[in-house]
Amino acid sequence: MSSAKERMIARAAREITPGMVVNLGIGLPTQVVNHLPRDFPVCLHTENGMTGIGPTLTPDQADRNLIDAGGSYVSTVPGSAFFDSATSFAMVRSGRLDLTMLGAFEVSASGDLANWKIPGKFSPGVGGGVELAQKARRVVVLTTHTDRAGNPKLKETCSLPLTARACVARIFTDMAVIDVTPRGFVLVETLGGISAAEVAEATGAPLLLPDTDLPEFEARHGR
Amino acid sequence: MSSAKERMIARAAREITPGMVVNLGIGLPTQVVNHLPRDFPVCLHTENGMTGIGPTLTPDQADRNLIDAGGSYVSTVPGSAFFDSATSFAMVRSGRLDLTMLGAFEVSASGDLANWKIPGKFSPGVGGGVELAQKARRVVVLTTHTDRAGNPKLKETCSLPLTARACVARIFTDMAVIDVTPRGFVLVETLGGISAAEVAEATGAPLLLPDTDLPEFEARHGR
Amino acid sequence: MRLPDKSCKIASAIAKIKPGDRVMIGGFGVPGTPMTLIQALVDHGADNLTIIKNDANEPGMGIDHLLQSGQVSRLITTHLGLNTHAISLMNTGQIEVEFNAQGILAERIRAGGAGIGAVLSDIGIGTELAVGKQVVEIAGKPHLVETALRADVALIHADRADIFGNLAYVATAQNFNPLMAMAADCVIAETETLLPLGGLAANAVHTAGVFVDHVAELAELSKEYAVVQR
Amino acid sequence: MRLPDKSCKIASAIAKIKPGDRVMIGGFGVPGTPMTLIQALVDHGADNLTIIKNDANEPGMGIDHLLQSGQVSRLITTHLGLNTHAISLMNTGQIEVEFNAQGILAERIRAGGAGIGAVLSDIGIGTELAVGKQVVEIAGKPHLVETALRADVALIHADRADIFGNLAYVATAQNFNPLMAMAADCVIAETETLLPLGGLAANAVHTAGVFVDHVAELAELSKEYAVVQR
């Protein structure tokens, strides 16, 4: 993984504050857990029926009955609980998730999220993403700033089928931290060494600058 | 309790066949359990969250956390299970009860049941009765044939607020066993010593006689 | 990762209840009724409450104390048969009572806890329970819209709990407790035994601690928890 | 009173499945997938099946055997991401696939098991998941009618069971199993351990035996149950 991606993940980890209940989506978001201090007070939720996820295990260490929603073998912590899929999404829909971190194909300037289907190319099904995006109290996205062809993933409007409308509050990329506001995208931080102009150039919609100084973010967990 | 009532309850017990899942309503129906052989294969359900009810206990023997829906202290049998109220009624509504036995204020010739409210006199609420009456695979009623004033409880139509429409299949009274059929009430058995004419006289709707001989029923459990 | 500690004092948790709040209270008869939390709510004094509870206990027990103290203006319930005092308050118009079929009350509360707007059910069609309810057809068959119920606060009784708020119940003391423990903005649980993290096996949890905001261990069980001598 | 014995041989239970049946199958990935019952259904051969399952396992595992044998005409699911073979069958029109949001699939199955006609939910409004669904307003807000799902047969994997069919699950092998175990006319459970009556504590039961028609102990765990080496 690129250093910029690693720093993006480390920065996103600082979004988690003590006491939160958090769901980390499949892909880049699950790696956020590696940047949390060992004794950090947080409850991680996985939609296949568990609260209190502990560190990921290798196949050699694994319990065959204990996976996360992405199929990785995970462990428990003292106080973990198991439950069925209906109860798991009851937590999500009734607002008991303080935060979810999701991947994205596209995010619009109004916070629409597209992350489950590329018609004709990729349509494995929506899984638990719709409910996470629509119902977590705060939804943030982790994504590369552009796709492999260099096209912006942050756009005026999404062209792909939506996961949920107006759900994304903040986006962490390998270039910047950007908030979705009623005025559109607002640049919050840049990765060290990247200028605001470079971020704006790689963004497919107007990018507002903050009134204050623009901080740079680093890889270290800030607590 | 009168001998006739006791014999009615004993006769009703023979309605339970091996392997059934049965809910016995509050009042006379709960006493049916005393007429089942000790080793009889049956699963008794109570709507406050238990399958596998065992014998009723005195306060001296009781577990403070173990009651039936009528508030009596009950016991478990090997294989009992506890669950919440939503699961309990999931069983009822999805058709997992083979039989329920309920009390009645009135039963109509089309099988309508009224057993929860006498406007102005008695309206404690409907409890679990509506769902039991509407959704058990077979609903039978245990009731005295007439009320304390001697008025028939089996009527052409119910005058009291209904519990459920067209739900009752069979009625056990202190005079007779009567089926509810598309043609109305049909006399099936009489209590020993009571004539068909006496039953018809005490019934508030036409009472058809069977084509066959009319058996008398007795108190002994017939297995 | 370490799960947060939600253990609390009963009085400080109950102090969050405001006049006019909707309060769900677990229990079916004595089993599962949080007698100590109810007494704390009487001591706290918030009034004009809407209480959502399967039944009204018996005179002099459980939520009858809240009826006696005049703190209840509305009761959403299924059956008051064992509380003549509650029936009298209803008949004289001192409290407003809404009756639900018991399993429908359970489903409405569960729907609230599951973030579902309503369930569609055919229970009560053709009876006065259907009066005033919106009707929706599914495949040509009429169903009643039974809307979700949520509360400001839920008062729960557990047998065992850990400090994260994972709960376990025993016997028929389960009843409405696991449902209500999902369906309120603030969920307060009393428990007969409070365990450290890891004290409750992950497979034995009935209510996941994520749903629970405060958990308090009972110092003693008052006589209202005991077997009722009839 | 004695609870009936529902223990059975797998082949005789599976023989009840008919061509064209709707079959629910528990599991999320490997955990909770009844690999042995699935193999028995392949051996049985009933075809034109509608399978209701969270996912399609991985190529060469679980329900992929039913896809390989051509017994499946329709799949109601949430995500096929780990089974490229299933995606290929979908893309070439060899199977029809209906995608549901995962929690909505869970609620629809639970509704079927709870004798509820539908749930009203705002999940997916404004996306293509809402297309073609009936809309009902609750307090002025639009909700989608998500109809109940039931099946002819449900195939369940339990960790422990007693001969009455009371089931218990472990870890994340729970997932859809307790929901599907309520929602079929014929519920068949395989279990790693089968206990006599009384072997499963009444408070530790996850699925009450009343919902279960047949329960069979697994003679051995095939390698498909093992940790997947990636």
Image (cartoon, coloured by chain):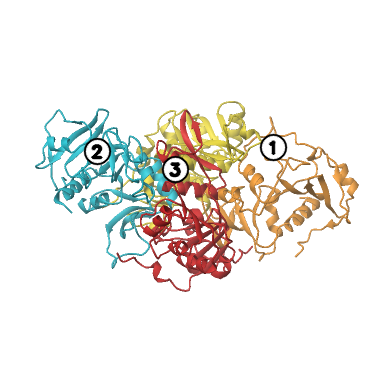
Chain colours: A cyan, B orange, C yellow, D red
Q: Residue furthest top?
A: C93
Q: Judge whether C148 appears above or below D39 on screen.
A: above
The amino acid type, in three-letter code, at marker 1 is: Leu
| B205 relative to C20 in the view: left or right | right
Q: Are marks 3 and 1 on the same chain?
A: no
Task: Say which of marks 3 and 1 sits in front.
Answer: 3
Instruction: Out of B209 and C222, give the one closest to the viewer.
Output: B209
Q: Residue at x 53, y 33 (%)?
A: C75
**Relative image position of residue B164 (x, y in whole percent):** 68, 40
Return the x and y of residue B105 as percentages of the image width and height.
73, 40
The residue that appears at 27% across and 59% down in the rendered structure is A56
Q: How many numbered callouts? A: 3
Q: Which residue is mark 1?
A: B162
Q: Which residue is mark 3?
A: C114
Label 1: element kind: loop
The answer to whether marks 3 and 1 mark residues whose Cβ atoms lie closer than 8 Å is no
Q: CA distance from mark 3 to mark 1?
A: 32 Å
Front-lying residue, B87 or C42: B87
Label of residue A154 in the image = 2
Where residue B31 appears, as percent x and y from the top left, is: 69, 53
Chain of the residue that carries numbered disc 2 in the rendered image = A
Above/below status of B129 relative to D56:
above
Q: Residues within 10 Å of mark 2 (few under 14, many from 20)?
A: many
Q: Are marks 3 and 2 in contact (CB under 8 Å)?
A: no
User: Chain ID for label 3?
Assistant: C
Residue at image coords 31%, 39%: A113
Whether residue C190 can be seen here: no
The kind of secondary structure element at disc 2 is: strand
In the rendered structure, are the residues bearing label 1 and label 2 in contact, judged by CB atoms less than 8 Å apart?
Answer: no
Image quarter where the C terminus of chain B lies is bottom right
- Estimate the spatial distance between the alpha carbons at disc 1 and disc 2, rounded to whole Å: 60 Å
Local crowd size for mark 3, using a 10 Å CA cut-off: few (<14), some (14–19), many (≥20)? many
